Image (cartoon, rainbow, N blue to C red):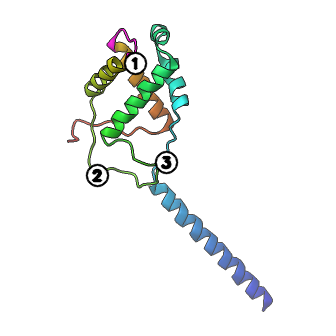
Amino acid sequence: MIWLFIVLAAVSVFLIAALTIGREAHRLDALAPRAVYQLEQAADFVAQSLSESTQARLTMEELEQLLVLHMNWLHAKGLLPDKAVDHRQGQETAVVVSDDSLIGFLLGKVEELGIDLVDDVDIVSITQAHLAYFDAIGAIGPLASGTDT
């Protein structure tokens, strides 16, 4: 009789553990993985991707300012949450941003801040490297296809 209780207890513990682990695995699978953005790490990543001439013109502080401006622009477009919280994957409406509007925004801010950039190509390479950093940490979504409107 005691062996029956031991077997029932072991089976009960196994079932409770299996159901709990299965439920949590299913819940975590439905959540987007959390991408952690670190400004210093992003600035280092972007700086390594820039040409030597651009690196010579920009200080790390100016580069960090440009990255923060880029993040603010993304937030204004609805692409960054107000706070980091777990949420289900998928977005109801497609959000499409063009490179032209970002480059124009950053060029205007560069003039306001007095950052010494000789060419628009500097801004383009900074934003491309910044987007590559987003991709590297898993914070970038899929590209829009021609059928998405």
Identify the main secondary structure in magenta: loop
Q: Which percent across, then down, holds residue 116?
A: 40, 11
SS under mark 3: loop
Segment colored magenta:
114-120
Mark 2 — residue?
92
The image shows residue 21, relative to residue 120, as above or below, that is: below
Q: Pick whichever, 84 or 147, lies toward us.
A: 84
- The count of marks equals 3
Q: Pick whichever, 120 or 141, lies toward us.
A: 120
Q: Pick whichever, 118 or 34, lies toward us.
A: 118
Q: Residue at x 46, y 7 (%)?
A: 53
Q: Is label 1 or label 3 in front?
A: 1
Q: Which percent across, then down, holds residue 59?
A: 50, 16
Figure quadrant of the C terminus: top left
The three-letter amino acid code for the residue at tag 3 is Pro
Mark 1 — residue?
125
The three-letter amino acid code for the residue at tag 1 is Ser
Q: Which percent across, then down, holds residue 23?
A: 53, 66
Magenta region includes residue 119: yes
The image shows residue 53, relative to residue 34, as above or below, that is: above
The span from disc 1 to disc 3 (Cα, nearest Å) is 27 Å
Mark 3 — residue?
33
The span from disc 1 to disc 2 (Cα, nearest Å) is 31 Å
Magenta region includes residue 92: no
SS under mark 2: loop
Q: Badge 2 local density, few (<14 within 10 Å), some, or many (20+)?
A: few
Q: Which percent across, then down, holds residue 76?
A: 31, 39
Q: Residue at x 78, y 92 (%)?
A: 1
The reply to whether discs 3 and 2 touch (Cβ–Cβ < 8 Å) is no
The span from disc 3 to disc 2 (Cα, nearest Å) is 18 Å
Whichever of callouts 1 and 2 sits on the residue coming sooner in the sequence is 2
Q: Residue at x 23, y 41 (%)?
A: 148
